Image: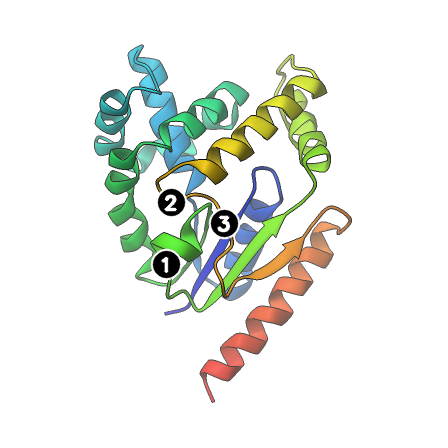
Amino acid sequence: MTVIAIDGTFASGKGTLGKRLAAHYGLAYLDTGKLYRAVGYAVMQAGDDPENAAHAAKAAKALTGAELDDPILKSGEVAVNASKVAVHTDVRQALFQFQRDFAAKGAVLDGRDIGTVICPDADVKFYVDAKAEIRAQRRHKELISYGEDITFETVLSQLIERDHRDKTREEAPLKAAEDAHLIETSVMGIDEVFDTAVRITDAILALKTT
């Protein structure tokens, strides 16, 4: 079964790429960030503290996967809390097997530790990134479309803070796998990003079948 791992920074375009690659290759798709968003939202709903490891772990262990389609997970507040619960070791351990089981049948997974921790033996690995200002513009436009009242400056500040938290956490920090193919999306359109990824994927899969 083919497994494609996509890691990268927040709002870099990895989710859009993941969905298109999954559709192109007939694979299941999992936005692993939604798992952490669902945990963060569950903590919020319970009135608990996302920075409290015990509170976050309790929510993670109760996750079924049915929560991932809730549109509230796209909100800015949930995204901030997702980053906060993701630093906890117990949360990551609770979600580890869920992700491994999903990948076992062949899939495209995107997140922040897919190629390094969840699926280190993935057939193809990508690391997607873009300049912070570009990513903040994309995220601000998205939040405005959801009806949220938030400034670009606030989005940029939250994004920079999230980048720092993701890259410096002790448990599974965000970084490119040594064998990941880097895609910088600052000046690339969606189609160009997708075409680039397909060329790389086809070349790697062709080598594996020879």
The residue where tag 1 is placed is 119
Q: Which amino acid lies under the numbered mark 1 shown in the image of this protein?
A: Cys
Q: Nearer the viewer, residue 44 or 154?
A: 154
- Whole-percent x and y of residue 183? 64, 56
94 displayed left or right of 7:
left
In the picture, the disc for residue 61 is none
Q: Mark 3 — residue?
A: 175
Which mark's residue is nearer the viewer, 1 or 2?
Answer: 2
Residue sitting farthest toward the bottom: 210
Nearest the viewer among 174 and 200 is: 174
Is 122 positioned to the left or the right of 163 in the image? left
Q: Secondary structure at mark 3?
A: loop
Residue type at numbered disc 3: Lys
Residue 47: name its quadrant.
Answer: top left
Circle 2 Cα neighbour tier, 10 Å, few/some/many (<14 / 14–19 / ≥20): many
In which quadrant will I find the N terminus? bottom left
Query: For numbered disc 2, what is the local secondary structure?
Result: loop
Which residue appears at 31% of the width and 38% of the height?
65
What sort of colour scheme is used for the picture?
rainbow
How far is disc 1 from disc 2 in space, using C-alphas?
12 Å
> How far apart in space, not on screen, are marks 1 and 3 (Cα)?
14 Å
- The dot on residue 172 is 2
What is the three-letter code of the residue carrying label 2?
Ala
What's the CA distance linking mark 3 and mark 2? Answer: 9 Å
The residue sitting at 43% across, 57% down in the picture is 115
Whole-percent x, y for residue 45 in the image: 33, 14
Residue ID at (51%, 83%)? 207
Q: At 55% across and 34% down in the image, what residue appears?
A: 163
Locate residue 58, reporting x and y percent. Answer: 21, 26
